[in-house]
Image (tube, rainbow, N blue to C red):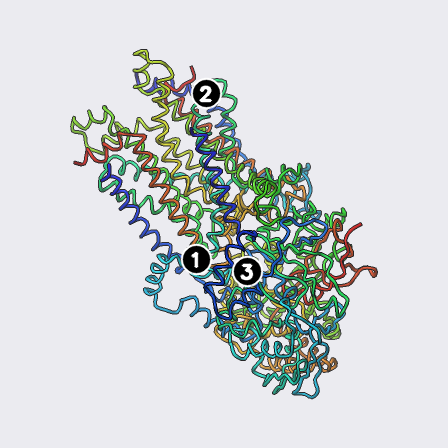
Amino acid sequence: MKRVLSTLLVLVVILSMLAACGPTPTPEKVIVTVPVLQTVTVKETVPVVVTAVPEKPTEVTYPRNETLYVSGAAWGPPSDWNPFITWSKANTTGTIGLVYETLFLYDPLSDKMIPWLAESGKWVDADTYELKLRKGITWSDGQPMTAADVVFTYELGKKYAAIWFSPMWNYLKSATATSDYDITFEFTNPLYQEWDNNLYNIAIVPKHLWESRTEEQITAGANEKPVGSGAYLYETHSEDRNVWVRNENWWATKLLGMKPAPKRIVDMRFSSNNVALGAVVKGEVDLSNNFLPGIATLSEKGYVKTYFAGPPYMLSANTAVLFLNTTKKPMDDPAFRKALAFSINTGDIVNVAYAGLVKAANPTGLLPSLEKYVDKDVVAKLGFTFDTAKAKQILASAGYKDVNGDGFVEAPDGSKIELEVTCPFGWTDWMEAIKIIAKSAQAAGINLKDATPDYGAWNTALTTGTFDMTLNNWAGMSNTPWTLYNLLFRHPIQDIMGSGNFGRWNNQKMFDLVDKLAATPSSDEAGMKAVCSQIQELMLTEMPVIPLWYNGLWAQYSDAVWTNWPTESSNTPSRLPCTWSGYWQMGGLIMLTELKPAQ
Amino acid sequence: MRRYLGRKLLIYVLTFFLAVTIDWLIPRFMPGDPVQTMLSRASLHAEAVEVMHGYYTRAFGLDVPVWRQYLNFWVAIFHGDLGTSVYLFPQPVIKIIMRAVPYDVFLLLPAILLSWFAGNWFGAFAARNKWLDNTLLPLGYILTATPYMWLGILLAWLFGVVLGIFPIAGAYSFSMRPHLSWAFIGSVVKHWFLPFASIFLVKFGGWAIGMRNMIIYELEADYSHYLEALGAPRGLIRKYAFRNAILPQITGLSLDLGVIVAGALVTEVVFSYPGIGYLILQAIQNQDYFLIQGCFLFIIIGVLLANFAIDIAYVIVDPRTRLGMVGESA
Amino acid sequence: MSKRKVRSETLYFALRNNKLRVGLSVILFFLVLTFVGPLLTHYAPYDYVNPLGAQPPSAKYWFGTTMFGQDVFTQFVHGLKATFLVGVVGGGLGTLIGILIGFTAGYRGGVVDEVLNMITNIVLVIPTLAILLIIAAYLKVRGILTESIFIGCTAWPWAARAIRAQTFSLRSREFVDLARLSGMSPWRIIFTEIAPNMMSYLLLVFILQFGGAILNAATLDFIGLGPTNAVSLGLMMNNAVLWGALLLGIWWWFVPPGLAIMAIVGALYVTNVGLDEVFNPKLREM
């Protein structure tokens, strides 16, 4: 009896599971719903419904050799496909890049803007930018893309403050379609650097499907079943995956002869890196962009491929910077900050905490892809290295002495120094890194301890400026050094510093320099270099932030099903092998078109 | 009897009220600003952050007075509206939870019930059976003393990595869409098996030992010896002992339903199984007020319902309870 | 029978009880290791001692080293201390609260029972993690002791309910009725008539609480809500899993902590049954 009962229970549960797994479009269901639709909706909304429906009966199992499995770009269940909800980009990587596309692509490895939806774009004078849209691009519902779509998208930023690029309208005066394929942008005092950056980050949406939406739908709608212009279409999703299927009518196949090799991309969301590592080892994932410690071992054993065959294995993606709270003592003293910079054993962070998976940063913090903007003379003169003796010496000559004999120095005014270096709990690599930072500072006589509050508490301390010192890396790969300096020296100083200058270093000279850089045209490389050199000199003299190492563009891939992955070698493509949101436009998409099936 | 259950019901309604109030209160005591956290995850450019902050504070209803927020919370609950998730913006919390619930039911119900029945049966069987007691019972001790995640890790490693028989992540194959076929059902069961097994095994050990100890206790009670002296058959004595011993086990079962959430949580994390446990962890890590509240509300309702059901079962199994409740106080 | 004789008889049976002997020796072994272990190692738990990173157990590093070259044995013995502390403080507190509430509710019945039962129910349904989250957010640095007290304060409901249920069914038995008729006060009845009849049950409760506290702590540590400034066995497992020890074959990192928890908690349970048999002559193996 009991056995029968429990068997029954299990059956019921399995059935309810199946029911909950989501409706599979079966022919019966379609037949049932059609008459209802016709009788109820007599308005002109019917054709819209019809265009959204033409989904063919899709395959329910995906052939392995046609499917690309990726992971590491997102952690949570897919929640939206709206290209304007930027903070959830982590949840739906590919919305921008695979479905919605940008006017340009940017290749950090060659530092080139690649015309994409745009055929060309140029500054005709200091305040006018003319853009030519490519002819023959169609949305996935068959409608052509025109200049009106671009103008509509850009003007969303003017209409709605919640759109991330709305600040651009502080200097953008107007966007006008002069023909179906020509757009003229008018400015007053444009920030050229940001403009370029936006060119490959703003995703163009179809006006005919978006113009009737409310503000809330545009800025906060889930946008299920997105209609874009890109190489892939949304197919399905569940809690732990998002599936894209190739758009066989993609414009670039016709116009540029590019065709992505995988018919489907399954974006897998793993709860932990451990699970991701397991999937990589078992060959269930073709491209993993997770941070997987120990990948060096696996790479050397030949289980996986990485961009570089030897250390640091990965390309560099962003700079881990130690922000010092300059409103607190003794971090308000440049000598103390400088001593701290000399005391940190970056070598141990690179070799012990990361087992050689990262590279020590240039003292200026600029990524290797922006190396040309580093003023080597300034670095040679003012740069820092790990040197405990030097750190002690700087402290001593600035008046920091161990008065009470506890092994740690006191401030020149005799007050005790007790400091904390933080990172969010659970960020394992950083947790190891701050342990090393604390230990090496202690060796130089600075009483520094590591602490790991939860993310929320850490974030509050960061943005309200109550921390002592903390790690941050919120400036990603970019076309311009301004991105990093905009993070490090954001201004003006406000109560909440949400997007940079967390240490609240208030230096008008630096702020002016960063503004000057922002307003320098990208074509004026010499001008950019000159400003960068001044920024670097001031930064390394005052040391308000300490760049430590470059976090990697974590990427490990398997040759089992797909080959021709990007590597350093000259006979493979050189692209960013990355599926992170924002990186499809920086090489990920083109990589897909260059992949080849194995055998 | 009806009066007894009526009073119990009243208590549960009261409990529900208090529990929901605390549930509402808890996230609001937390330092930190959820909108700020959410926006900072975006690593946005520039001034957009400040503008968006105000916009979303209004959108999330955090700008009205606290008492209003509380009232709104109750009104919303009865409309099945648990707010919008911050972490999985713009998905409604109720939708997210309803997608996760089936996985939990599918994982927990069989694991809990089967382990309870099997454990009790095995424990009762092993009691006073010297050979079983000495050989198989140590296994029970080892199982019940094993941390869930450690067993999960070992199972995942052995069957997932070394032997490669079972998958170690997801609820069904990454190469499938849900549909009705044997292949799909097979895939679902295959993904379900290891998480199920790790919860089942640990719980099984616990119930078996509990039952074994209770049975021995009862078999040595005076009434057992009395019955024995009267020449009652051994089977009858064991039956009485079993009926007495099962009482604490029933209580234990009702309590376990609440506690097991933690066990399920780590198991779901180890196996990337998309249930509520995993959702809670994500919600906590992302400071998602609404999702945390929603998950907790579901657990509260679940535990209360289970407790009530078990209260009824308890009354049916132990008639003395009825007398104790109604007879004495009169 | 004199008291002395009872005691020596108990001792006699205790020494001859195999379960007790096995259980106690395992616990004793780990206790000794907890106190002697730190003297056997000259490293601190988080020191990077082995520049080669993860290395299997050897003469120099008895339990091998972690991915960063930290000595696993050092972490292990320091983690043991945390485990025992959590068990004693968390388990003790949980039992104490459970006994007080369980007896009162079970014996008094009526309104008292319902009020206490309601409190129990509320504490039971409020998910433990939520409260820990608050504590975690307010306390910048979480310690082992905080964790233990917290576990104790949230783990008592099941004990209270179980003790209440037992008291309940004992309450309507004849000997309790007799005592009540003879005019004994409620607390006297509880302590002279009911409690002795539940002694092994209470012990079972404590030992389950002790073990449960250890397991709870391991769970919290594992999901990253454990102490932020200490070593514990759960944290070791957490780190091992986070750093992929499983798939990289660094088994010496995650096997010892899990095995130790299992051994200690298992030994506690076995000890409990053994003790039960010693104190309760009827239960001794025939």
What's the CA distance linking mark 3 and mark 1? 16 Å
Say which residue label 2 marks: C17
Q: Position of residue A561 (x, y in %)?
A: 74, 50
**Amino acid type for the residue under numbered disc 3:** Thr
**Amino acid type for the residue under numbered disc 1:** Tyr
Q: Circle 3 sits in a helix, a strand or a loop, which is it?
A: strand
Circles 3 and 2: CB atoms closer than 8 Å? no
Q: Residue furthest right?
A: A571
Tell which of A307 and A544 is nearer to you.
A307
Chain of the residue that carries numbered disc 1 in the rendered image? C
Q: Quadrant for the N terminus of chain A, please.
A: top left
Tell which of C24 and A496 is nearer to you.
A496
Tell which of A533 and A65 is nearer to you.
A65
**Amino acid type for the residue under numbered disc 2:** Asn
Label drawn at residue C138:
1
Q: Earlier in the sequence, mark 1 or mark 2?
A: 2
Q: Is residue A333 visible?
A: yes
Q: Is residue C74 visible?
A: no
Q: Residue at x 79, y 60 (%)?
A: A568
Q: Residue at x 46, y 18 (%)?
A: B129
Above or below: residue B262 compared with residue B288:
above
Above or below: residue A274 compared with residue B77:
above
Q: Position of residue A432 (x, y in %)?
A: 61, 54
Left or right: A313, with A277 as reference point: right
Chain of the residue that carries numbered disc 2 in the rendered image? C
Tag 3: Cα neighbours inside 10 Å, few (<14), some, or many (≥20)? many
What's the CA distance linking mark 1 and mark 2? 48 Å
Q: Circle 1 sits in a helix, a strand or a loop, which is it?
A: helix
Label drawn at residue A422:
3
